[in-house]
Amino acid sequence: MTGFSATVLTLYPEMFPGPLGSALAGKALEKGIWGLETVQIRDFATDRHRSVDDTPAGGGPGMVLRADVVGRALDSIGADDRPRLLMSPRGRPLTQGFVRDLAAGPGLVALCGRFEGVDERVIEGRELIEVSVGDYVLSGGEVAAMIVLDAVVRLLDGVMGQRESGCEESFETGLLEYPHYTRPQVWEERRIPEVLTSGDHKAIARWRHAQSEAITRDRRPDLWRAWEAAHATGGTRE
């Protein structure tokens, strides 16, 4: 029996597992570390055309997923403690901290929106948590749900080979990750920084931390300001 269970509600269940069936997530799925099921939203339509959407109240372009159809699809899952997410560009940003919280839980339910969106009444009535994977618009929530699941699954116990491999990655410490190098020693006249081959582990740690600071300060000033604020009083940068 899996410890982490994911249910995805979608109009395109054939899209899953997709990339989640390969690499780390796929191996973990085969081992039963996590489980995945899909629910076809259209199965809960009641008319002969299996309609799931209708025109927006008040007018406007596009179509809106109906509250009654989506509500029945959500209710078919039954009551459990898993958070119910709606993939939405207006949702709370997906952060590494949020990912860690999800990975520590029993699983998640992900509703994949389509068209112009989902009737607000079902969002409120089923207490859906709207989640955004970035400041851009996708054609549907399926790819966003895959991003959430990929980020979460890799943190589950037994998925990554070395627990330490995830501890120093971007966002885990509040800073972006330092540069990586491997053999050959020289490539196109570019050498591996000498400190990394010195064997001085303290010097290597200092170099890596300094690189993380510099990259974060240059590329993500928002993260840098947050990190500085968190370390402004009594903190250490070692």
Image (cartoon, helix red, strand yellow):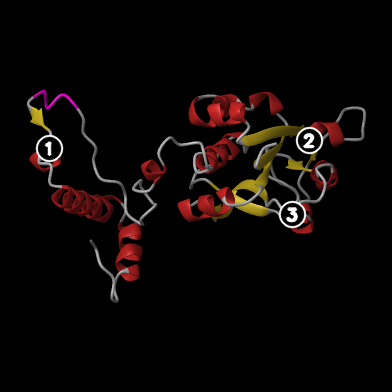
Q: Secondary structure at mark 3?
A: helix
Instruction: Identify the residue position indicated by label 1 in the image.
Output: 197
Disc 3 packing (10 Å; few <14; some 14–19; many ≥20)? few
For image coordinates 24% across by 55% down, the residue present is 213
For image coordinates 78% across by 42% down, the residue present is 55
Disc 1 or 2, which lies upstream in sequence? 2
Disc 3 or 2, which lies upstream in sequence? 2
- Is 96 located above or below residue 73 in the figure? below
Task: Work out which quarter of the rendered image holds the C terminus and state it.
Answer: bottom left
Label disc, if present, on residue 41 of the rendered structure: 2
Please say if the residues under marks 1 and 2 sit with CB atoms less than 8 Å apart. no
Query: For the residues carrying marks 1 and 2, which lies nearer the camera in this image?
Result: 1
Q: Quadrant of residue 111?
A: top right
170 relative to 217 in the view: left or right: right
Identify the amino acid type marked 3. Glu
**Direction bottom: furthest residue:** 233
Query: For the residues carrying marks 3 and 2, which lies nearer the camera in this image?
Result: 2
Q: How many marks?
A: 3
Label disc, if present, on residue 120 of the rendered structure: 3
Secondary structure predominantly adopted by residues drawn in magenta:
loop
Cα distance, mark 1 to mark 2?
A: 56 Å
* Residue 204 magenta: no
Q: Secondary structure at mark 1?
A: helix
Identify the amino acid type marked 1. Thr
Q: Residue 48 in the image: state x and y as whole percent.
A: 92, 28
Q: Residue 49 in the image: state x and y as whole percent.
A: 88, 27
- Is 207 located above or below residue 191 in the figure? below
- Is 191 located above or below residue 4 in the figure? above
Magenta residues, start to end: 183-188
For image coordinates 9% across by 31% down, the residue present is 191
